[in-house]
Amino acid sequence: MIDLHTHTIFSDGELIPSELIRRAIVQGYEAIGLTDHVDYTNVEHVLKSVQKAKYIEKSYDIKVLPGVEITHVPPEEIAPLAKMAKELGAEIVVVHGESPVEPVAPGTNAAATKCPDVDILAHPGFITEEEARDAVKNNVFLEITARSGHNRTNGHVARIGKLVGATMVVDTDAHSPYDLITDEIALKVVMGAGLEEKEARQVLENSRKLIK
């Protein structure tokens, strides 16, 4: 399993990075992104903290990618904050998309899909075809999520993503150890979004494109 969207105690997750990573290893993970919620008030602190988790790679066979999830930031601030995060060393930049279960500002999906410093638009809700085409142009991946609530629109995301040829990935948006999943469950999540098994297996492989 490659999961590029998870949370630790540096935002609203339950575990410190080493605990979360160890739980992921037991689930068969080969790579994990630590992408805690950030805005301008905490981006430096979060990245400085989670970057230290790279030490675990010396002891365990897992790739650790320090990153961020830009969350509830005004749309016009997404691009400069994503650029700042990359300059601060973020290996993965996620943007909290316009999920049907959170009041993310309208225009967030549009801003994120136009930004080449964004790697993944998380649970993008009712993303439009135009926004998805912008994601293709700017190499922004669209997320099919295992997260309860956010996953209500997985079918729409998969349909639009397939229509425009967007690159899709599957992530957990884990906040607790019980949110972590295996490859088998990830495959079921993607197929449950309406993709055929061959297409779903490719979605699981797409995450490798973001591992440096």
Image (cartoon, rainbow, N blue to C red):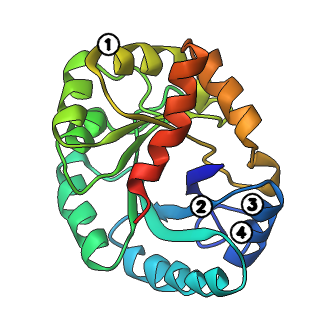
Residue 22's spot in the image, x, y percent?
78, 70
Task: Assess whether mark 3 and mark 4 are in contact (beta carbons under 8 angstroms).
Answer: yes
Residue that badge 1 annotates = 163
* C-alpha separation, residue under disc 1 versus residue under disc 2: 28 Å
For the residue labelled by badge 4, is the local secondary structure a helix, a strand or a loop?
helix
Residue type at the position of mark 2: Ile
Residue type at the position of mark 3: Ala
* C-alpha separation, residue under disc 4 versus residue under disc 2: 7 Å
* C-alpha separation, residue under disc 1 versus residue under disc 3: 33 Å
Residue that badge 2 annotates = 32
| Residue appearing at x 60%, y 61% in the figure | 31
Residue that badge 4 annotates = 21
Circle 3 crowding by C-alpha within 10 Å: few under 14, some 14–19, many from 20:
many
Tell me if residue 184 comes above or below residue 197 in the rendering: below
For the residue labelled by badge 1, is the local secondary structure a helix, a strand or a loop?
helix
Residue 7's spot in the image, x, y percent?
61, 60
